[in-house]
């Protein structure tokens, strides 16, 4: 009897050994996944996702580069971005108009005048149909976190034109600043979720600023509607499937470096000695991927490759409140780094759709008041101003809520609680631009 049991155990162990020996390794699994995706017509590299580069006559990116080159040569003293002075600083707790002195505002206007050659180049750039930077060539593990976008340049650019939109000397100058920001953010081509996170966050700030400028009577609503309506029609949520494909292509490009171990070769640096290099950021990203939330499958190289297959779950066209919720809860993505970045971006894109639609409704409400002398009483009153239908609240697919607050009109979206940032509900709704309060003009 014991001999039979022993033989049986040996047979089981032999079968398991044979299975392990014959099971395709990670290199073969990766090759099979790439072959399957190619057979489905899916891109497997970032470059394959890219449409052709537009001609220079249609691409504003070179002009942006020229503007930033001028800035680097002629930038003012560092004190211009002090923590205590100015509407350009987004880190201050209070809105700038609650703390900036007249002297500070005047100093900022002088700065904006000095930067006129810079803004001329920016205005020419955003007048082009698109802004496209070439995809960086990726030759080794250290290149894998490369953005398409010149992120540091864009961060400074958005900061500067944000100052112009919030502190220009005239309503027209402030509006030109808003127009430049909206066009920069809607016309820039992105090719990764990280790039999109940069631009969508900038767009969110721009639309909140537009709301606040309207509330402060700092821009003319009719001029804003005429200039911005076409760009505000951008459907941000429709970008999600492309971004998911880009994240998968990025993962496929990373995986050979994970398999051969080269991403693990960065030295371990004690915290505080020096900032990590881009190479070490990549190693950290992979470590977080492997050591993240408890996965539903073993965190092996093969398991990581299979996670790339799971991204098919995110390729439904568009995004809604329900699909954002399902992204947050989908067990197939637990332990997957894509689950850490895709749901927040999906949430931001949905918020941007809401803000763009709210802006169009708010500007049309001002137009209605200009023509009829009263605020619209309901969503239907705005129908003559929209040939393609009055925009709906994307959270509910119903009209925005109209409320009266004295002589002001309040346009309110109704987000589900799970899509609010983790703070007190009324404050979150205000911060995220869910409430637009329109004073009479």
Image: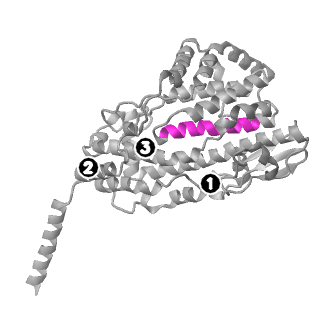
Q: Where the N terminus falls, by quadrant?
A: bottom left
Count neighbours of disc 2 (C-alpha within 10 A) and say few if under 14, some if 14 to 19, many if 20 or more: few
Q: Dot 3: what SS?
A: helix
User: Start and end of the magenta stretch?
Assistant: 194-212
The residue most toward the bottom is 1
Left or right: where does residue 337 sit relative to residue 105?
Answer: left
Q: Nearer the viewer, residue 432 or 423?
A: 432
Image point (66%, 14%), residue name: 116
The mark found on residue 419 in the picture is 1
Q: Which residue is mark 3?
A: 246
Magenta stretch encompasses residue 254 = no
Q: Is residue 169 left or right of residue 72?
A: right
Tell me where residue 338 appears, x and y as whole percent. Answer: 44, 50
In the picture of the structure, the residue carrying the numbered disc 2 is 31
Secondary structure under tag 2 reads helix
Name the magenta segment's main secondary structure: helix
State which quadrant residue 145 falls in. Answer: top left
Q: CA distance from mark 3 to mark 2?
A: 18 Å
Q: Is residue 109 left or right of residue 132?
A: right
Q: Quadrant of residue 281?
A: top left
Q: Is residue 234 above or below residue 289?
A: above
Side of 12 relative to 426 (left or right): left
Q: What mark, if any, has residue 17 been given in the picture?
A: none
Q: Dot 3: within a 10 Å radius of its alpha carbon, few (fewer than 14), some, or many (20 or more) residues?
A: many
């Amino acid at each position: 009897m014991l001999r039979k049991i022993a033989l049986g155990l040996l047979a089981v162990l032999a079968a398991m050994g044979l299975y392990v020996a014959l099971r395709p390794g990670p290199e073969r699994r990766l090759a099979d996944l790439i072959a399957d995706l190619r057979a489905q017509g899916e891109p497997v590299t970032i470059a394959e996702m890219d449409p052709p580069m537009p001609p220079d006559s249609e691409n504003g990116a070179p002009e942006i580069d020229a503007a930033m080159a001028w800035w680097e040569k002629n930038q003012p003293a560092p004190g211009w971005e002090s923590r205590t002075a100015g509407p350009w600083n987004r880190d201050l707790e209070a809105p700038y108009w609650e703390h900036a002195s007249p002297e500070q505002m005047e100093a900022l206007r002088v700065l904006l005048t000095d930067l006129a050659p810079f803004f001329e180049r920016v205005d020419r750039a955003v007048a082009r149909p698109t802004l496209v930077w070439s995809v960086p060539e990726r030759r080794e593990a250290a290149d894998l976190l490369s953005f398409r976008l010149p992120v540091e340049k864009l961060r400074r650019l958005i900061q500067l034109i944000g100052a112009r939109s919030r502190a220009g000397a005239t309503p027209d100058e402030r509006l030109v600043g808003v127009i430049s920001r909206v066009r920069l953010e809607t016309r820039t081509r992105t090719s990764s979720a990280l790039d999109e996170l940069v631009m969508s966050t900038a767009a969110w700030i721009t639309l909140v600023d537009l709301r606040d400028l309207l509330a402060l009577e700092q821009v003319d609503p009719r001029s804003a509607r005429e200039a911005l309506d076409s760009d505000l029609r951008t459907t941000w949520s429709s970008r999600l499937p492309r971004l998911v494909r880009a994240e998968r292509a990025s993962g496929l490009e990373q995986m050979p470096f994970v398999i051969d171990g080269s991403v693990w070769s960065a030295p371990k640096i004690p915290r505080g000695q020096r900032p990590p290099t881009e190479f070490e950021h990549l190693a950290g990203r992979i470590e977080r991927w492997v050591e993240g939330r408890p996965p539903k499958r073993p965190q092996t190289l093969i398991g990581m490759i299979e996670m790339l297959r799971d991204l098919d779950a995110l390729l439904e066209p568009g995004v809604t409140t329900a699909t954002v919720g399902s992204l947050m809860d989908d067990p197939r993505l637990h332990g997957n780094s894509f689950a850490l970045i895709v749901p927040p971006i999906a949430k931001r894109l949905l918020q941007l759709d809401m803000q763009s639609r709210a802006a169009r409704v708010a500007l049309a409400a001002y137009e209605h008041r200009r023509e009829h002398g009263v605020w619209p009483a309901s969503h239907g009153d705005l129908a003559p101003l929209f040939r393609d239908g009055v925009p709906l609240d994307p959270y509910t697919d119903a009209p925005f809520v109209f409320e009266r607050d004295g002589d002001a009109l309040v346009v309110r979206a109704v987000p589900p609680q799970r899509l609010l940032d983790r703070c007190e509900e009324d404050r979150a709704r205000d911060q995220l631009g869910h409430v637009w309060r329109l004073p009479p003009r």
